[in-house]
Amino acid sequence: MLVLSDIHERTRSLPRLARRVRELGGVDLVLLAGDITYFKPVEAAVKILREIRESIGTPVFYVPGNCDDPRLTTDAESAGDIVNIHGRHVVHGDYVFYGVGGGGISPFNTWIEYGENDFKRLLENAKAHDPGRLVMVTHQPIKGFFDEVNGVNIGSEAFREFLYSVQPLLWVTGHVHEHSGWVRAGKTTVIHPGPFMRGYYALVSLSNSVVDTRVERL
């Protein structure tokens, strides 16, 4: 899988990324953890999603970020193999993908923000799935994981509680541009690919519930 986040409309590097992916033998899925645009209408997000689909040549599963059009929380605005997984699950191969878009409450009043109770509500349906097959995709980071900004951890406490109580196989996050990398937390691999607007991305392989990942930059 190719994992991206925080594009913010800066797609100039997509051809280079597509060449890199082809050199490595290709991928069978793109995961996008939000902030496709920078406060632009839904049509701009759909255009970018289609560009990614055409460049990489695989299905795209995505959630909206806090800077995306709020219509992306209720309407996929896409069809076929471009799939909005915000608040819903999709089965792909042996794995279940579940998404939660948007950011936490901030002083900046961005377009899609949720409180902790909202995040808990959005996570409820994810609990029904086998943790060993569950891949979480959230824009907001988990409290304590790739979430430090000016010495403050801004991640979601609800996500942290879910992480340690459920232990999904894989968790992809974004939002905080200052971070990129991956880490193990119990049985879960947590990945923040870093902002694609600066050339960051991650490559992930899942096989028999084993996660192999690397974070790279163009």
Image: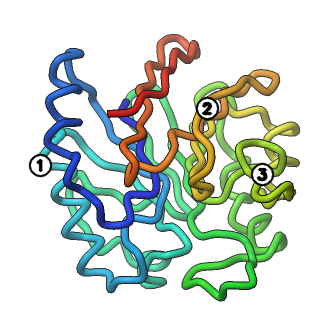
**Residue 119: percent from the left, percent from the top?**
74, 66
Q: Residue at x 19, y 69 (%)?
A: 47
Report if the CB atoms under discs 3 and 2 are less than 8 Å apart. Answer: no
Which residue type does callout 3 highlight?
A: Glu
Q: Nearer the viewer, residue 76 or 196?
A: 196
Q: Earlier in the sequence, mark 2 or mark 1?
A: 1
Neighbours of disc 1 within 10 Å: few (<14), some (14-19), many (20+): few
Neighbours of disc 2 within 10 Å: few (<14), some (14-19), many (20+): many
Q: Which quadrant, please, contains the C terminus?
A: top left
Of the residues tagged 1 and 3, which is closer to the observer?
Answer: 3
* SS category of the residue bearing label 2: strand
**Residue 122: percent from the left, percent from the top?**
69, 65
**Residue 214: percent from the left, percent from the top?**
49, 21
Q: Nearer the viewer, residue 66 or 216?
A: 216
Which residue type does callout 1 highlight?
A: Glu
**Residue linked to disc 3:** 148
